[in-house]
Image: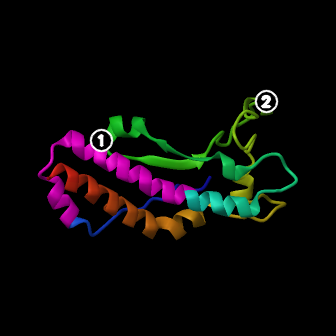
Amino acid sequence: MADAIKFEVHGLKELGDRLDNIAQEPKRKGGRFALRKAANKVRDEAKARARRIDDPTSAAEISENIVVRWDGKHFRRTGELKFKVGIMGGAGGSAKSERYAGLPGGDTRHWRHVEFGTERTRAQPFMRPALAESISAATEEFVREYNKKLDRLLK
């Protein structure tokens, strides 16, 4: 199984200095809002890439099942804000197809075979390149949105 792609945002000293002047609750809410907007940039890029490789002869559409989810468990455990960009239904294991038929894109548990390939099919990555291509735009969006929130709080 491939490791998750992780990244850190550097060079935000000014933003950190401003955050020191704000109570924790508004800081968390503003950060969560800004982080969701940034994650949406990655989601949109992943959807666009998935649309290009979705099989038009299949009822399943991977692009329709790409979502952004808040990771509350991670927040409660570490105090760090985290959103996940992923595929509804995940890998799904051995569950019956009917369980996933109600998802907007249908049963797309095969997305992992598309992303990573199999011994018989070549990989057609769309999630990993989506993050790589949109990381700059996502970072800029995060900084822009968080600064807007801070401007409203510090007035």
- What crowding class fits label 2: few (fewer than 14 Cα within 10 Å), some (14-19), or many (20 or more)? few
* Front position in the image: 70 or 128: 70
Q: Which of the marked residues, 1 or 2, is nearer the chain's N terminus?
A: 1
Residue 128 pos. (x, y %) = 58, 62
Q: Which mark is residue 98?
A: 2
Label 1 or label 2, whichever lies nearer to me, is 2
Does dot 2 land on a helix, a strand or a loop? helix
Residue found farthest to the right:
57
Report if residue 15 lies within the magenta region: yes
Residue 123 pos. (x, y %) = 73, 64
Task: From the viewer's perspective, tell me whether residue 97 is left or right of residue 21.
Answer: right
Q: Residue at x 22, y 61 (%)?
A: 15
Residue 18 pos. (x, y %) = 16, 58
Magenta stretch, main secondary structure class: helix
Task: From the viewer's perspective, tell me whether residue 118 is left or right of residue 18.
Answer: right
Query: Mark 2: which amino acid?
Result: Glu
Q: Is residue 95 visible?
A: yes
Looking at the image, how many numbered discs can be counted on the residues? Answer: 2
Residue 130 against residue 87 in the figure, above or below: below
Q: Which picture quadrant has residue 25?
A: top left
Task: From the viewer's perspective, tell me whether residue 48 is left or right of residue 97.
Answer: left
Q: Which residue is mark 1?
A: 79
The part of the chain drawn in magenta is 14-43
- What crowding class fits label 1: few (fewer than 14 Cα within 10 Å), some (14-19), or many (20 or more)? few
Task: From the viewer's perspective, tell me whether residue 23 is left or right of residue 135.
Answer: left
Q: Residue at x 62, y 52 (%)?
A: 1
Q: Residue at x 47, y 54 (%)?
A: 39
Query: Mark 1: which amino acid?
Result: Gly
